[in-house]
Amino acid sequence: MTGRVAAVNLGRVTEAEWAGDASGRSGIDKRPVDAPVAFRVDGVVGDFIGERAHHGGEDQAVYAYAEEDAAWWTTELGRDIRPGGFGENLTTYAVDVTGAVIGEQWQVGSALLQVTKPRTPCTTFAGFWGVPDLIKRFTVRALPGAYLRVLREGEVGPGDPVEVVDRPAHGVTIGEVFRATSLEPELLPRLLDAEDLPESIREKARRRLGR
């Protein structure tokens, strides 16, 4: 089955006490749009980002989450979670986001994207959902979604196919990186094989391994 974009979502300004920005503003509340959106190296045009110290930037230009993984949370929490509810720019369908290899390249619309790292849950995420223990539950579930770089700028719209056009041979996945840096430190040596993983994560792995 060919993967596709189920929705493209843009963040709007949300002011709340749980927002991570010092100004009390967050862009986690993302909503689907009908028309194609420009994906640039520094992010998605029209997407509000509140706390730029931890969100956005070239290694986190786009955040993708799988519709199938969201469906599990809908059942778990007993409530509907609309596209964008995870703070994702791309809601995907029939794309193995957790199994995506670090450095893997996706052709989506006219843009070329590259998988960089998993998302780390934060207090803003838990506050937005109103689930105090969400960080722990999200970590245990280990379906974090993936951040992506924009290698070639272009436009992406709902319904566009998601085609994997390159996949590194090292095989280190989004799921492995997430588990290695959270609950399964025995996986840390694998992270050193993934050259396209942001250097900050590779350096953290080296320190924890004493290298």
Image (spheres, helix red, strand yellow):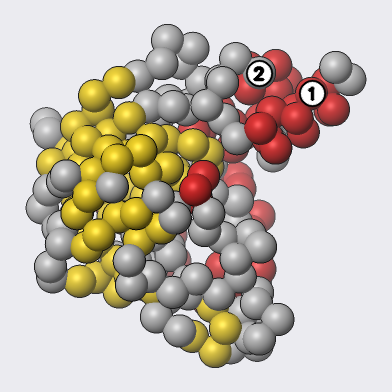
Q: Earlier in the sequence, mark 2 or mark 1?
A: 2
Q: Quadrant of residue 113?
A: top left
Q: Is residue 21 visible?
A: yes
**How far across and how far down the image is residue 208, in percent?**
84, 28
Q: Residues within 10 Å of mark 2 (few under 14, many from 20)?
A: some
Marks 2 and 1 in Cβ contact (< 8 Å): yes
Q: Residue at x 38, y 70 (%)?
A: 47
Relative to 89, residue 179 above or below: above
Q: Residue at x 66, y 55 (%)?
A: 136
**How far across and how far down the image is residue 211, in percent?**
85, 17
Q: Quadrant of residue 156?
A: bottom left
Kindly report the distance in space between the C-alpha atoms of the residues bearing marks 2 and 1: 8 Å
Q: Residue at x 43, y 63 (%)?
A: 86
Residue 206 tag number: 1
Kindly state the secondary structure of the residue where label 1 is placed. helix
**How far across and how far down the image is residue 11, in percent?**
39, 73
**How far across and how far down the image is residue 43, in percent?**
41, 58
Residue where numbered disc 2 is placed: 192
Relative to 172, residue 113 above or below: below
Q: How many marks?
A: 2
Q: Residue at x 60, y 66 (%)?
A: 52
